Amino acid sequence: MRRRGWARGSRIAVLLGSLTLVLGGCSAKDWERDLRFGWPTGVTKQAERMRVLWTWSGVVALVLGVVVWGLIFWCCIRYRKRADDQLPRQTKYNLLVEVVCFTFPFLVIAGLFWRTVVVENYVNKVTKNPNVRVQVDAFKWQWQFEYHSYEDASGNVHKTVYPGVKDLADAAGNAGLESQKERSSTPPRTCDEAASNDSYVCGASGQDKTAGGPLYLSTVGTQQVIPVLVLPVNRKIRIVEHSEDVIHSFWVPEFLFKRDVIPYGTTSTARDNQFEIEPTKTGSFVGRCAELCGTYHSQMNFEVRVVPEQTFEKYLQALASISYDDPQRQAKALRMANMSPYATTTYPLTSERDARKPAQKPKE
């Protein structure tokens, strides 16, 4: 009779659980996606892999916790003291119990370790031919975004440079050309060879240059304007990080990822950190420096704006039509691409130490 009661109760519980899922309209994919244990919803394929790893690690931990709690409570009830002269059966030196207690946790740890390595390798993977190449220059206490090239829907690769202009200064405004020693001991003979060498650049005319290089389309933040990094959705984007002074860190919370920007004391990017992302959702997302870099570290914000591919190409075309030395080129290009000319997720902060008012949205 007792077994029948347990069976009846189990069937009722399964029926109620199934009915709850049906009425709630939740599929297995929906609840798996929403079961994030406090993690934000990622907006890239890499973030999705990390979130799935986090979710199922939490599920495994909860299952193990339930098993351990169940065994503890079962032992407390099953082997509780019934009389002063009666002791529970002793299982000391029980080989089966010891083998299970050793093997099961080891298998769980090994499985979690293996899955972590797989996801980490996926996140760190850098493909040979990304669709978009962007260089992020960090300096106290702002960001510059250089758009080096992009591949359109037809597969054609476009180099995004200001025609006939050489790059004679770094993002912080320090004038000076990179020396041949910094670039490469043996420079490439053609620009096609240089394309595979991030430490060497070619002139706008297509001829090799041992001093100076093309000036890429770029925008830079100021005390009054938050820099905006515009990226296309559903495209592989290579980001090369370059620091002009101290260690910074490129962090967008919705990417579930951040990476330090290490200074190497040279304008070469050969050793700079780089990674790839593939955004899957359009929108505007605040970015921050996650490494304490000085007095105004907390104000070193930027915005990532993920847009459709047509909007991204329109933005670069608009940027190319504006003079490279126009301080308002970012706002003008964004407006020409039918986007908000200023950041919407974060606003500039005043650098005055006696200021007590919150950040204000800039006037358009």
Image: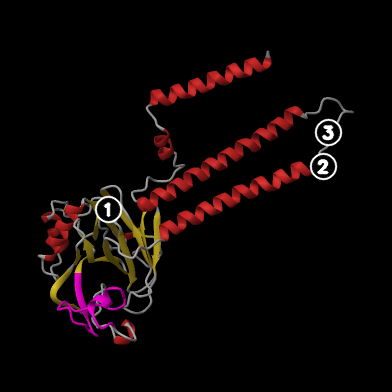
The region drawn magenta spans 188-216
Residue in the picture at 40% in, 62% down: 259
User: What residue does disc 2 label?
Assistant: 92
Do the numbered discs 2 and 1 sit on residues whose CB atoms are within 8 Å? no
User: What residue does disc 1 label?
Assistant: 346
Task: Please say whether residue 358 is visible from this viewpoint.
Answer: no
- Of 229 and 187, nearer the camera is 187
Q: Secondary structure of the magenta portion, mostly?
A: loop
State the image coordinates of residue 81 (x, y, percent, origin top left).
81, 28
Task: For mark 1, give the secondary structure.
Answer: loop
Residue in the picture at 33% in, 83% down: 184
- Of 269 and 1, nearer the camera is 1
User: What residue does disc 3 label?
Assistant: 89
Residue 148 lies in quadrant? bottom left
Direction top: furthest residue: 1
Direction right: furthest residue: 85
Do the numbered discs 3 and 1 sit on residues whose CB atoms are within 8 Å? no
Quarter of the image for the N terminus: give it. Answer: top right
Task: For mark 3, give the secondary structure.
Answer: loop
Q: Kindly report which numbered mark, 2 or 1, lies closer to the viewer in this rendering.
A: 2
